[in-house]
Image: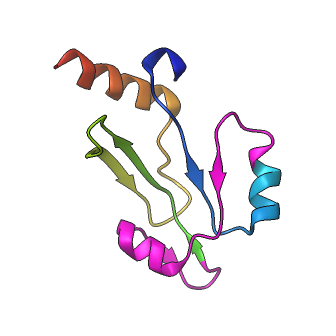
Amino acid sequence: MASLDAKVYAASVDDVEKASEIASNLSYPVGHGITRADADKLGSWWEDRRSIIQPSEFIVGADGKVILSTYSSGPIGRMLATDAVKMINMYESRK
């Protein structure tokens, strides 16, 4: 994503220790402690049974506006990095 001047961030319901453990294997930061209130603000699907947020992904433009989003009500439906790159390139080519 560096060649696109794009950044990746992730967040989880996990506590700081677990999120740090996960982040140690990744090249981007992972936030921690996402709550039901956070999920509601994002419009994300919250699973009460396990107290987790389902995949909610956003491409945000340089102006801070969401230009693309995906939401899932289960574990299927995550945005692939290759798809994100294609979308960013498409939006950049339209400028």
Q: Residue at x 42, y 31 (%)?
A: 84
Considering only vertical position in the picture, is 14 above or below 88? below
Residue 25 falls left or right of residue 43: right
Q: Which residues are magenta?
A: 23-51
Relative image position of residue 61 (x, y in whole percent): 30, 37
Q: Residue furthest bottom?
A: 49
Q: Residue at x 79, y 39 (%)?
A: 25
Considering only vertical position in the picture, is 23 above or below 92? below
Q: Nearer the viewer, residue 22 or 47?
A: 22
Q: Is residue 40 magenta?
A: yes
Q: Nearer the viewer, residue 63 or 18?
A: 63
Image-quadrant location for residue 93: top left
Q: Residue at x 45, y 72 (%)?
A: 39
Q: Residue furthest left?
A: 95
Image-quadrant location for residue 71: bottom left
Give the quarter of the figure containing the C terminus. Answer: top left
Q: So how many labels did they put on this image?
A: 0
Relative image position of residue 47 (x, y in whole percent): 54, 78
Relative image position of residue 37 (x, y in whole percent): 46, 80
Considering only vertical position in the picture, is 75 above or below 26? below
What's the colour scheme? rainbow
Q: Residue at x 45, y 66 (%)?
A: 73
Relative image position of residue 53 (x, y in whole percent): 54, 69
Q: Nearer the viewer, residue 11 or 46?
A: 11
